[in-house]
Image (cartoon, grey):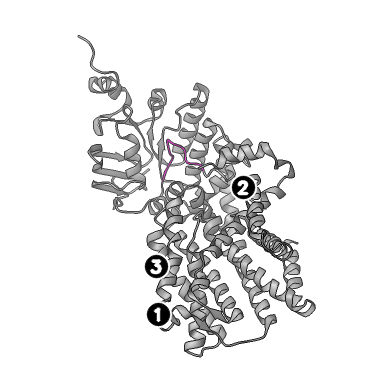
Amino acid sequence: MSEHPAGPLLEARKLTRRFQGLVAVNEVSIAVNYDEIVGLIGPNGSGKTTLIGLISGTLPPDEGELFFEGKRIEEMAAYRRAHLGIARTFQVMKPFPGLSVLDNVTVGALFGLNGGEHKRARARELARFMVEFTGLGRRMDQRADALGGPDRKRLELAKALAMQPRLLLLDEVMAGLTAVEVDEVIEIIKKIRQEGVAILVVEHVIKAIRSLSDRVCVLHHGQKIAEGDPATVFEDPQVIEAYLGTRRK
Amino acid sequence: MRWAALALIAALLAILPWVGDDVMIQYGINALLVATLAQAWNIIGGFTGYASFGNSVFYGLGTYGTAIAMVQFGLPFGVGLALGGALGMLCALLLGLPILRLRGHYFAIATLGLSATMAAIVANLDIAGRNIGLILPLTRNDAMFYEASLALLAATTLTVIWLALSRFGMGLIAIREDEDAAAVMGVNTTFYKVVALVLSSFFTAVAGGIHAYWITFIDPASAFDLTLNVRMVIMAVFGGPGTVFGPLIGSFILSSVYDWLASSISTAAALLFGLVIVIAVVFMPRGLIDLGAGLRRVGWRYLLQNIRLHRI
């Protein structure tokens, strides 16, 4: 671990994003260290997906600063952030519908970290590996729009992994999966971390957050209301209130 | 093997001027140029997924660029073609940067108005002969025009083959399939789209230049003709957009059908031609090429499935 430069891999300082009157993300500061998994939780509409959008470059922030390895990136186009090693999945999945599973993933390999693997044969090989790794091997040559929900989630993951990211932003990759499938994805994410990839994981499946996260951040109405190790955060009365409402006296 | 077959087809086409009669050669020039237009449209429309109605503008600029160079400056044909091509590319670059920010129908609509605008501009330029047009030097050498058209079609098709095999082409396809996803996966979408439009414009403009010298008379209305753009779209979509050979097959078949209809039942030709297209698009929305992938897929079942998949 000592080969990493000082400071976190990703650091957001007071990021703010408004949609007309609504402040979707309000002065949120968050950091992800090298080799770390950070869980990002919060009730629906708390700004988790918006924050992922701000970090990945799909949305420009209104205010605040974003650093990746100490470099300012909040003005940088999404594709250049991808070349730096930031990859994301989409909660509302965005497969390339008319392409095969393998071709979908090959795009990630061709264009990801440092502009990707330019040799098509080698990109395809990497993609093939990621398709197998995420358990889509049997669907390799199927069109993406023929996949069911759970397989589309896996495809999102495979596409992001083929980019050989250094920071992986996972936006609810477990939503709608069965308990068995959730366990499979947890195992996959653990293996990804062992490869030295830092991960920011947005999830409603609390079991997954508990077993994966080194640290948890809680968003509520666009603001960060708690941060810390999972056990402490889940006992925090403010967090419980955000999720369940005020306890009746 | 495939390359050998392609080379053989090209060689067979190339010897036509020595074995065919004048009518055949003239039909050939037209068919080759129209196929080039369909194939060039395929780059921006089929691969990148941006339904351009601005390609007739590039065609017109190629036409006028070549004509002005030859008539007003007395330059040779080759130089005229190069200038026409450059003019088309410059226009694509300047138009592409703002207009390619629009997506889907909005892009199509924004490009739709360009032909009429450009025709009006050209009709007021002295150097372009205002609305009377220009008359190019007469050259009776149909074999040369035929070979030039064939070479252009070959170059366009080789470019499309390169797209189908390269990282660059994969980027265009990713943009067509989902532009947001393509961007976060590392595709420089703006650059890719503009390059696609510029490539498309180059081949389209050069085709316009060859046609201008062959036909020897040009005017704003025929150079910036939106119906020509519609034909490009129809032929590419009929054959199979986003494939290498679909637009070629589509344009050759439709050119032949149209010529045959026009010569046998002249008045109702356009009507029947329209009917052919409607039926074709209804039953094989993804083109003739799709049909080749499995004959079983034609029929009502497939039609309904396609309506579900492709409805707006």
Residue sitting farthest toward the bottom? B74
Which numbered disc, 2 or 3, marks the residue that appears first in the sequence? Answer: 3
Q: CA distance from mark 1 to mark 3?
A: 20 Å
Side (left or right) of A6 relative to B158: left
Q: Is residue A116 left or right of residue B286?
A: left
Q: Chain of mark 2?
A: B
Give the residue pinned by disc 3: B94
Task: Please give the residue where the numbered disc 1 appears in the rendered image.
Answer: B125
Task: Determine whether, in the image, residue A102 is placed left or right of residue B115.
Answer: right
Asked whether the residues under the numbered discs 1 and 3 touch, taking CB atoms below 8 Å apart as contact, a structural biologist would say no
Residue at image coords 45%, 46% = B181
Q: Nearer the viewer, mark 1 or mark 2?
A: 1
Q: Secondary structure at mark 1?
A: loop
**Residue A117 appears in the figure:** no
Alpha carbons under labels 2 and 3: distance apart: 32 Å
Circle 3 SS class:
helix
Marks 1 and 2 sit apart, C-alpha to C-alpha, by 42 Å
* Marks 1 and 3 share the same chain: yes
Whether discs 1 and 2 lie on one chain: the answer is yes
Q: Nearer the viewer, mark 2 or mark 3?
A: 2
Asked which quadrant contains residue B248, the reply is bottom right
- Is residue B145 depicted above or below B111 in this figure? below
Label drawn at residue B285? 2
Q: Are marks 2 and 3 on the same chain?
A: yes
Q: Chain of mark 1?
A: B
Residue sitting at x 38%, y 34%? A201
Span shown in magenta = A87-95
Q: Earlier in the sequence, mark 1 or mark 3?
A: 3
Residue at the far right: name it: B19
Looking at the picture, tell me which residue is in the foreground, B253 or B247: B253
